[in-house]
Image: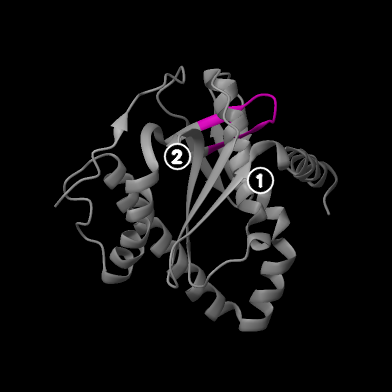
């Protein structure tokens, strides 16, 4: 099975990994400075709380749980294949079902033609400045520019305005990465493996930094004062 043969250049983060803990209140990462930072996905969940609550009420708890589990399982499987492929592993499709393989093949063409160097995959990051942490899918050179690259899966084609949470999340990763490595990255790349075809959105970090800070501040306010 042909691998991607991607060039890798390891960047030192100053640590090997961060230990994550998941509780009912969300996920936190234990940083080397002995601070447990909330996951950026936990912080950003406040943006969709009302929408998810309304959706669950509309479809019913049992159906909502079924759909969520299926989407999560598919997303994890596609991420795993993509990570193995970009790591140049030979048996990257082992255990993947036909849906996952189909999603991967759509994205494979994009990565083969546009991703030329990889600095990190599934790297745990944190920012003392932002007060958050997270695990970035991929950091590398995409279309000739240093980029934060995030993989998503979707059942239907997405409009850009539906993806704002993705861009905010990637902005956090870009800031964390620069803080940890000294390497500034402004290009954000969202690669969506969709049942209706692959999509790529490219954004600039600075267009989303204000919204990121606003969301973090709102998350902190809710933690202190509640809703």
Q: Residue at x 39, y 64 (%)?
A: 74
The quarter holding residue 62 reads bottom right
Name the residue beneath numbered marker 1.
168
Determine the residue positioned at 52% across, 19% down: 181
Q: Name the residue under label 2.
A: 142
Secondary element at tag 1: helix
Q: Position of residue 61 (x, y in %)?
A: 59, 77
Residue 80 percent location from the top left of the image: 33, 51
The stretch in magenta equals 125-134
Residue 107: % across, % down = 37, 56
How far across and down, in percent of the image, does residue 68 sit?
51, 69
Circles 1 and 2: CB atoms closer than 8 Å: no
Q: Is residue 200 left or right of residue 98?
A: right
Q: Main secondary structure of the magenta part?
A: strand
Tag of residue 210: none
- When the figure is inspected, residue 94 is found, relative to residue 211, above or below; the finding is below
Distance from the alpha carbon under mark 1 to that under mark 2: 19 Å
Which is more foreground, mark 1 or mark 2?
Answer: 2
Q: Is residue 161 in the magenta section?
A: no
Of residues 105 and 64, the one drawn nearer to the viewer in this rendering? 105
Q: Which quadrant is the C terminus positioned in? A: bottom right
SS label for mark 2: strand
Please give the count of numbered marks on the rendered protein: 2
Q: Does the magenta stretch include residue 127?
A: yes
Q: Which of marks 1 and 2 is nearer the N terminus?
A: 2
**Up/down of 209 relative to 55, above or below:** above
Question: Which residue is drawn at the image coordinates 29% and 31% (left, top)?
Answer: 7
């Amino acid at each position: 099975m042909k691998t991607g043969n991607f060039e890798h250049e390891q960047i030192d983060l100053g640590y090997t990994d961060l230990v994550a803990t998941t509780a009912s209140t969300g996920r936190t990462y234990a940083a080397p400075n002995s601070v447990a930072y909330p996951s950026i996905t936990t912080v950003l969940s406040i943006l969709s709380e009302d929408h998810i609550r309304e959706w669950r009420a509309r479809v019913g708890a049992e159906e909502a749980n079924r759909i969520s589990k299926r989407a999560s399982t598919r997303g994890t499987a596609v991420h795993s294949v993509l990570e193995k492929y970009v790591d140049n592993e030979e048996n990257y499709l082992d255990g993947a079902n036909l849906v996952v393989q189909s999603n991967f093949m759509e994205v494979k063409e994009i990565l083969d033609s546009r991703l030329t160097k990889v600095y990190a995959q599934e790297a745990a990051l944190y920012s003392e400045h932002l007060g958050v942490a997270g695990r970035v899918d991929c950091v590398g050179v995409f279309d000739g520019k240093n980029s934060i690259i995030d993989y998503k899966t979707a059942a239907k084609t997405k409009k850009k305005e539906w993806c704002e949470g993705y861009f905010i999340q990637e902005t956090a990763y870009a800031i964390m990465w620069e803080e940890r490595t000294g390497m500034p990255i402004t290009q954000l790349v969202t690669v969506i493996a969709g049942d209706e075809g692959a999509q790529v959105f490219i954004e600039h970090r600075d267009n989303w930094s204000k919204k990121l800070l606003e969301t973090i501040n709102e998350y902190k306010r809710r933690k202190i004062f509640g809703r």
